[in-house]
Image: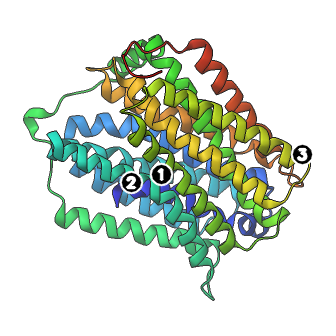
Amino acid sequence: MLAMLGPFNIDMYLPSFPQIADDLGARASLVQLSLTACLLGLAFGQLVIGPISDAIGRRKPILFFISLFAIFSLVCAVAPNIIVLILARFLQGFTASAGVVLSRAVVRDVFDGKALTKFFALLMVINATAPMIAPISGGAVLLLPFATWHTIFIFLFLLGIVMVMISAFKLPETLPEENRRPTSIASSLKTMGYLLKDPSFIGYAIVVCFVQGGTFAYVAGTPFVYQDLYHVSPQVFSVLFGINGLAIIFGSFLVGRLSSHFSERSLLRTGVIMSLTANTILLIATLFHWPLYMLVISLFIHLNSVGIILTSSFSLAMENQKERAGTASALLGMLPLVMGAIVAPIVGLDETTAVPMGAVLFTNSLIGAIIFFTFTRQKRQGKTK
């Protein structure tokens, strides 16, 4: 449940974007700015809460920050205007990041060896399926006779309360005192600075930053594009969003099946080319207002490539990061969220066309491809290239 909190917090309210815009009298770009605020909160919250848990343990931060998540979810539900909603979404995202970072930390504390690998695989499945379930759940909530967009945040408030209660009664402290280590802002910044100058890390990290980060243009844009321009219902939008979510799982599955025959770099190269090709088609489709199925197919191929890119680039970026693995993992998770925070409001600048969404996805894929072919180093392995 903790691992699902981040994706649910991002995606569950997507079907209600048009309703929020109408109810609060806000432009689409301002509603999408609430998604930007949430992404920034999730990004920077991980960098703060992770080191805190290394110093004082896992249980107290989980109880404290998930309780705050519930409170800020309630603030979102009663937000009287878009400004309050944007601020509350940042705080909601910041506190929800505790679920993302501490679920991994608890698993790392409790398991090792093959058991650790198996449980991390389970977390990855949850992280891949939660973005599919969340908007479908949001669409289902909106089907209730009394439901409005406020109801979705009330649901998240109740979810936070349930998580706090389960954690309070069932989750013991998993980090022994002898394994805790004090952290400082200075040491964390020094490690990040080293990573940002490490060519074996930063090239792959930037590829992920642009390709996965650009995908948030799809997350922010499709609620308006599908529902306002192509006139689908919130429930149909949720199903289409969920179908495209399957593409990420399929891409990750392909890497697992093919990694014994091809190197991670060759698989990453394939994913980068797939993403650029799909988004070239998407840009053309948005420019000429092609039928909806062309957008859905293009986005499915792109998201399939994202699954390939995320899985293969992680091992390439992390292979030389031993004592810096925790910070490196946090940066890999943070950079796409920061990019997503930048691109999310851009797609709402013109509400009469899907071109901004197509242009952002194409531009990010193009930059990702240029970075990959220019700045990443060939892996020296004996696998097929």
Name the residue located 34 percent from the left edge and 61 percent from the top edge: 1
Pointers 1 and 2 in contact (CB under 8 A)?
yes
- Gap between marks 2 and 3, in whole Å? 35 Å
Q: Which residue is mark 1?
A: 249
Q: Which element is circle 1 on?
A: helix
| 342 sits to left or right of 40 | right
Residue 32 visible (yes or no): no
Which circle, 3 or 1, is nearer the viewer?
1
Characterize the local packing of mark 3: few (<14), some (14-19) or many (20 or more) Cα atoms within 10 angstroms.
some
Q: Is residue 303 above or below residue 333?
A: below
> Which of disc 3 and disc 2 is earlier in sequence?
2
- Gap between marks 1 and 2, in whole Å? 8 Å
Name the residue located 23 percent from the left edge and 35 percent from the top edge: 54
Pointers 3 and 1 in contact (CB under 8 A)?
no
The three-letter code of the residue at mark 1 reads Ile
**Image quadrant assignment for residue 175:** top left
Residue 57 place in picture, x, y as percent: 20, 43
Q: Which residue is mark 2?
A: 125
Q: Which residue is mark 3?
A: 287
Outermost residue, left direction?
178
> Which of disc 1 and disc 3 is earlier in sequence?
1
Q: Which element is circle 3 on?
A: helix
The three-letter code of the residue at mark 3 reads Leu
